[in-house]
Image (cartoon, rainbow, N blue to C red):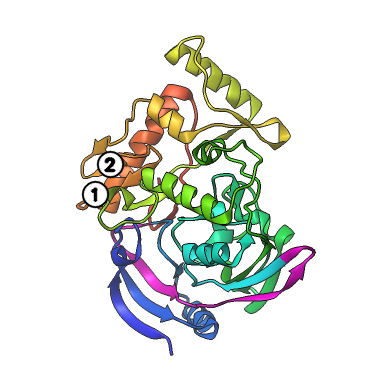
Amino acid sequence: MAVFAEEVNLAGYTTLRLGGPARRFVEATTEAELVAAVREADDRGEPVLVLGGGSNLVVSDDGFPGTVVHAGTRGAERTGADGDRVLVRVQAGEEWDAFVARCVSDGLAGIECLSGVPGRVGATPIQNVGAYGQDVSETIVEVRAYDRRARACVTLDRDACRFTYRHSVFKGDDRYLVLDVTYALHETERSQPIAYAELARRLGVQPGERVSLKEARDAVLELRRGKGMVLDAADPDTRSAGSFFTNPILEPAQLSVLERRVAERLGPDAVFPRYPEAGGRTKTSAAWLIDKAGFAKGHARGPARISTKHTLALTNPGEARTADLLALAREVRAGVREAFGVELVNEPVLVGVTL
């Protein structure tokens, strides 16, 4: 049976350790409890926040004036095959990295480069979680969800999920409550081709080569730890929401502005990271922009600071409030805009606050 409580402080449920109290808090450990908790809140006309691992949330200091449903469903099972791939259905409340570790141990390839990503399975399609050359959209074949508008459980195939860079049909719209996700994974002891140059260098291989699943996972975890991106209670740099800003994807006119600003600020021979995208657009690095705009690792504004290991992570070393973190985020965003004419966009979901 679902467990109910009132005035539960949400800071203890987010990796930033920030956020005020939830007026009502429900701990749901089965799909039926999860759906019932959301449906009952909808019937009462209350706002609803579905909470997983809390690794991609920035919650207001005032908390949440409705029902927070904590998704604690567990379970993963093989359900069949898709061509030469194995289908694995995973409940939304499963810890993501534990699932990745299990796949690596079981010889299932396709998500090994997403090792160390905090949070739970249900969040992965929402954000189209990606790192080190892999995105979950490459392996997701369907998502089961409760449609709050239709008041029914539905299945969305990959196309219906409308995946794009760090986005999907689920993001920015609370219509769907993710119940489980089905992934199609290759049964092999070798990784998928290594697509990310930094990871390839760490592994001592060329991009496109394969390594063992364990080698890929270990290298990714090592890289993430070096950037403070693996949760560690002893490391205040990991008290973050991961990358706070997405990498900008620029239209040709925006790219021309950036080229001009880089030349003006850093000299005519200066270069910046650029990666071709569909439709003639270009992706660049938010971390590079932040650094070159003058925000070094460890830069602080009050009790909130940029990670000492990675300029993309904004952290709460211990005494910050959500208001402090947002003040730092606004300072960084404004500085990058002034220096390079690029508007950074937050990656975490903002609850009860705006940037």
* Residue 173 in sight here: no
Tally of numbered tags? 2
Residue 259's spot in the image, x, y percent? 55, 18
Circle 2 SS class:
strand
Identify the residue at horizontal 50%, vertical 55% (top origin): 115
Q: Earlier in the sequence, mark 2 or mark 1?
A: 2
Callout 2 amino acid: Arg
> Of residues 184 and 207, which is closer to you in this image?
207
Q: In the image, is residue 13 part of the stretch drawn in magenta?
A: no
Seen in the picture, residue 172 relative to 24 is either above or below; the reply is above
> Of residues 50 and 93, which is closer to you in this image?
93
> Relative to residue 289, is residue 65 drawn left or right?
left
Prevailing SS of the magenta stretch = strand
Circle 1 SS class:
loop
Callout 1 amino acid: Pro
Which residue corresponds to mark 2? 305
Identify the residue at horizontal 29%, vertical 66% (top origin): 12
The quadrant in which the N terminus is found is bottom left
The label on residue 317 is 1
Part of the protein shown in magenta: 58-85
In the picture as drawn, the residue positioned furthest to the right comes out as 83
* Circles 2 and 1 in contact, beta carbons < 8 Å: yes
- The part of the image, by quadrant, that contains residue 233 is bottom left
> Relative to residue 245, is residue 239 drawn left or right?
left
Q: In the image, is residue 79 part of the stretch drawn in magenta?
A: yes
Residue 88's spot in the image, x, y percent? 64, 70
Seen in the picture, residue 349 relative to 197 is either above or below; the reply is below
Residue 271's spot in the image, x, y percent? 52, 18
The quadrant in which the C terminus is found is top left
Residue 274's spot in the image, x, y percent? 58, 28
